[in-house]
């Protein structure tokens, strides 16, 4: 009897779990420099398996040693991505609607599609003209509970007047960040971790550094309005883009939320 006829439930489960793991690894490195490293390692692994199948012992042994000895190097290279993955596992609530099973691609509901990006960007555009500083964190898959605990719990539907009133300079809520989950403002005055990367431009203030910090520790999307220049910055995975065209910004955020 041929081996493939012995394919059973555990084999199917094994393939499914590997597929899910690879999916999450791809999501963590997508859009970052690490994606090129990830693809390179994947190619080396496939070549290694091919050389093993073809009985090319010398090349197979060299590639095997390279992959085996490179684990420590990978931990260093993918430090931020591994941190995000562990945060994802550690913050998973199996009883909630955003539990682990809900995050499996074919089981999850696209809750983030409800987030009204047009309203959020419209508020940022208005605050930009008035040079009102703002820091807005939009949740995706990773939980923001650890950060929200540092602020004030809220439950307010997103709209332009509310966003502008929160960040109004005389408002008691304007310090810190706000978190938005499923089109609901869930916390204000949130204190975020500040990134100390030497590559961050020196003219970036604490808002931008905090935005980069939270985007390195979670998969959240962050919008920053500079109080000094009025410029709107979009931060994801530690990388930032300055935007003048709000229409393009809306399209990009919607694409990232999907």
Image (spheres, rainbow, N blue to C red):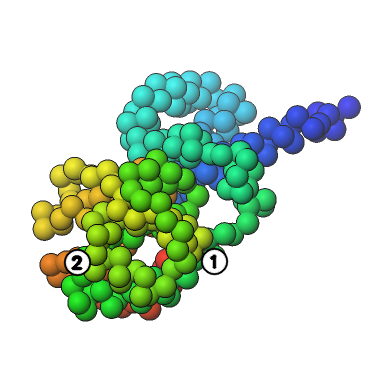
Q: Residue at x 35, y 39 (%)?
A: 80
Q: Residue at x 63, y 56 (%)?
A: 109
Element under disc 1: helix
Query: Disc 1 marks which residue?
Result: 114
**Image-quadrant location for residue 12:** top right
Distance between mark 1 and mark 2 Cα atoms: 29 Å
Query: Disc 2 marks which residue?
Result: 169
Residue 91: % across, % down: 49, 38
Please say if the residues under marks 1 and 2 sit with CB atoms less than 8 Å apart: no
Q: Earlier in the sequence, mark 1 or mark 2?
A: 1
Residue 56: % across, % down: 55, 25
Q: Looking at the figure, which quarter contains the N terminus?
A: top right
In depth, the one of 7 and 163 nearer the eye is: 163
Residue 226: % across, % down: 19, 65
Question: Quick one: label 1, few (<14), some, or many (20+) residues within 10 Å?
Answer: few
Residue 220 falls left or right of residue 201: right
Q: Nearer the viewer, mark 1 or mark 2?
A: 2
Q: Residue at x 21, y 70 (%)?
A: 132
**Image-quadrant location for residue 63:** top left
- Residue 58 in view (yes/no): no
In depth, the one of 113 and 54 nearer the eye is: 113
The answer to whether 225 is drawn above or below residue 61 in the figure is below
Element under disc 2: loop
Q: Residue at x 23, y 74 (%)?
A: 128
Report the residue that reaches farthest toward the right: 1
Residue 72 falls left or right of residue 91: left
In depth, the one of 11 and 253 nearer the eye is: 253
Question: Quick one: label 2, few (<14), some, or many (20+) residues within 10 Å?
Answer: some
The answer to whether 140 is drawn above or below residue 46 in the figure is below
């Amino acid at each position: 009897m041929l081996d493939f006829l012995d394919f059973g439930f555990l084999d199917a489960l094994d393939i499914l779990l590997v597929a899910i793991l690879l999916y999450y690894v791809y999501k963590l490195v997508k859009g970052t420099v690490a994606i090129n490293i990830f693809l390179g390692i994947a190619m080396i692994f496939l070549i290694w398996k091919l050389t093993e199948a073809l009985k090319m012992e010398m090349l197979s042994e060299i590639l095997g040693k390279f992959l085996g000895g490179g684990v420590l190097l990978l931990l260093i290279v993918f430090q931020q991505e591994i941190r995000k993955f562990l945060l994802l596992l550690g913050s998973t609530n199996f009883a909630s609607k955003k539990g682990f099973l809900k995050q499996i691609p074919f089981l999850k509901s696209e809750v983030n599609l409800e987030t009204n990006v047009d309203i959020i960007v419209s508020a940022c555009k208005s605050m930009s003209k008035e040079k009102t500083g703002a820091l807005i964190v939009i949740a995706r898959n990773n939980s923001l509970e650890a950060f929200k605990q540092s602020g004030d719990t809220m439950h307010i539907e997103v709209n332009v007047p509310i966003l502008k009133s929160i960040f109004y300079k005389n408002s008691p809520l304007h310090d810190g960040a706000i978190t938005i989950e499923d089109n609901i403002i869930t916390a204000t005055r949130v204190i975020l971790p500040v990134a100390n990367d030497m590559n961050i431009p020196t003219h970036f203030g604490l808002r931008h550094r905090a935005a980069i910090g939270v985007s390195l520790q979670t998969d959240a999307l962050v919008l920053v309005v500079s109080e000094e220049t009025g410029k709107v910055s979009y931060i994801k995975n530690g990388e930032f883009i300055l935007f003048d065209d709000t229409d393009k910004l809306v399209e990009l955020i919607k694409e990232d939320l999907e």
